[in-house]
Amino acid sequence: MRASDLLQPRPEGLYCPPADAYIDAMRPVPRCLITHGHSDHARTGHGAVLATAETLDIMAIRMGEGFAGSRQAIAYGQPLRLNEATITFVPAGHVLGSAQIAIECRGFRIVVSGDYKRQPDPTSAPFEPVACDVFLTEATFGLPVFRHPDAGQEIARLIQSLALFPDRPHLLGAYALGKAQRLIALLRASGFDRPIWLHGALVKLCAYYASRGIDLGDLRPIAGQGKADLAGELILCPPSAMADQWSRRFGDPVTCYASGWMRIRARARQRGVELPLVISDHVDWHDLTRTIVETGCGELWVTHGEADALVRWAELRGLPAKPLHLVGYGDEEAE
């Protein structure tokens, strides 16, 4: 079997003819397998959606209960027969419920990684490498310059800043799904037990994480709080809120932003970030290349990100590789 017989890039997204199903389709399709709940991978309007139970719940929270005609929860490691193909969801380590999707047919296996990371994360199941013939990977940070430091060290810098500036609130930009909850869990693991204040856009998803047994400690919605009440406090908000009128209510906050892009200091300056924290929910160059080696794949396809550099790295090692340049991925949460 050829790889193109099992998986094909189409305008709607990646299509698997033997299963008659798409993966992370960008347009409404009759049947779609979803890797995780970020909106550049999970969209409304599909006839049927298959995903982990957590991803289905997250889609309902973000998009409403009617996001698809029908839904089916798939547990990690549970093979599912779809027509002529067998589908298995495997932990991706990106956010709660995120999955790689392994597709097998006639002894040939392709693994679609979705977005993933290898760093420890108390809020999501850890990534599991899967041996395969073809590996489809992201390359959001697919350049050698990107080496993510230990997240605990970055959290220590944040806690130190809170102690250094006890009269200034700290405004921390973090995406609502995955990043915000991971930061909170890392803070708690580092011994920070004070209340953490939440922008309204983060409240429902944090409550959902807590309902899944993830201890996030004392979280409080910031609605109704005045400037004087928040001196020296830590406030989490979506990155977009840091630049709008909402953020002006805090006077002179210490602006913080957690992202892999904070490795590029010019980006921090452009955003007016006083305390950049290099914490990402995507693999850096080292973890990206070691993952490819661990899969033992005979061919590499790069879905999105810095594809050209990664393809060149593979070719220099004798591994056939090609960029897919899929449009639409990385538009949200690519941090």
Image (cartoon, helix red, strand yellow):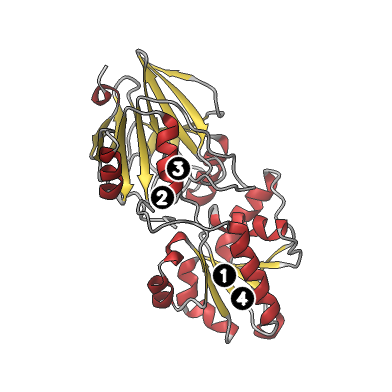
SS for tag 4?
A: strand
- Please name whichever residue, 157 or 216, is drawn nearer the observer in this view of the structure: 157
Q: Are marks 4 and 1 in contact (CB under 8 Å)?
A: yes
| Residue under pointer 4 | 170
| Residue under pointer 1 | 172
- Looking at the rendered image, the quarter that the N terminus falls into is top left
Q: Residues within 10 Å of mark 3 (few under 14, many from 20)?
A: many
Residue at (70%, 55%) from the top-left corner?
Answer: 216
* Image vertical order of residue 193 relative to residue 312, above or below: below
| Residue under pointer 2 | 285
Three-letter code, disc 2? Trp
Gap between marks 4 and 3 measured at Cα = 36 Å
Mark closer to the chain start, 3 or 1: 3
* In this rendering, the label closer to the viewer, 4 or 3: 4
* In this rendering, the label closer to the viewer, 3 or 1: 1
* In this rendering, the label closer to the viewer, 2 or 4: 2
| Residue under pointer 3 | 67
